[in-house]
């Protein structure tokens, strides 16, 4: 049996792909979290804005600002759903790359167990040979 795992190069490649997918997932999560934080900050800012109106021009300005803010929040919500879709896709890609790595890792584990069993068998064979030789030597020595 080969001492080295024949698919070790492929396993390293799968681990690199898994690391890349994990990085993509982390980046997608960071972007989604940053967008959620911006939305929360914008909502909090809008809640504390004073709404005292002293004239018609001020009323128009406040109305325009609120309409603009609503539009901006709607855009942020749309971006948030796009970012969540990207997170879902990145999670699916990570899960797929992880599954590919796990199957190869299991094969590597079975290979390692088989190599260890072969080593133990070879060692036991050598020990049996040594014991047999010693037994025969003692038997021939006692027959003389």
Image (spheres, rainbow, N blue to C red):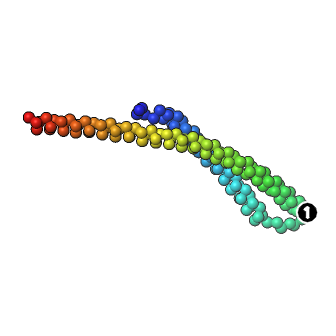
**114 sits to left or right of 134:** right
Residue farthest to the front, as pictured:
143
Near mark 1 (Cα within 10 A), the count class, few <14, some 14-19 or many ≥20, is few
**117 sits to left or right of 91:** left
Determine if residue 23 is in view.
Answer: no
24 or 112, nearer to the observer: 112
Image quarter for residue 65? bottom right
53 or 63, nearer to the observer: 63
- Image coords of residue 102 (percent x, y): 54, 43
What residue is disc 1 on?
A: 56
Residue drawn at x 79%, y 66% as measured from the top left: 50
- Looking at the image, residue 137 lies above or below residue 39: above
- Image coords of residue 142 (percent x, y): 10, 38
- Looking at the image, residue 13 lies above or below residue 86: above
Location of the N terminus by quadrant is top left
Residue drawn at x 45%, y 38% as measured from the top left: 111
- Image coords of residue 30 (percent x, y): 64, 50
- Image coords of residue 91 (percent x, y): 64, 47
């Amino acid at each position: 049996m080969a001492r080295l795992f024949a698919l070790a190069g492929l396993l390293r490649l799968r681990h690199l792909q898994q690391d890349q997918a994990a990085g993509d997932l982390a980046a997608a999560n960071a972007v989604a979290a940053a967008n959620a934080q911006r939305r929360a900050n914008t909502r909090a800012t809008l809640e504390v804005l004073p709404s005292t109106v002293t004239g018609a021009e001020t009323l128009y300005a406040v109305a325009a600002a609120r309409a603009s803010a609503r539009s901006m929040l709607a855009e942020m919500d749309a971006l948030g759903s796009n970012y969540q879709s990207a997170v879902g896709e990145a999670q699916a890609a990570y899960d797929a790359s992880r599954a590919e790595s796990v199957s190869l890792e299991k094969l590597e584990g079975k290979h390692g167990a088989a190599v260890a069993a072969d080593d133990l068998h070879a060692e036991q064979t050598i020990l049996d040979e040594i014991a047999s030789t010693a037994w025969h030597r003692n038997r021939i020595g006692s027959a003389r």
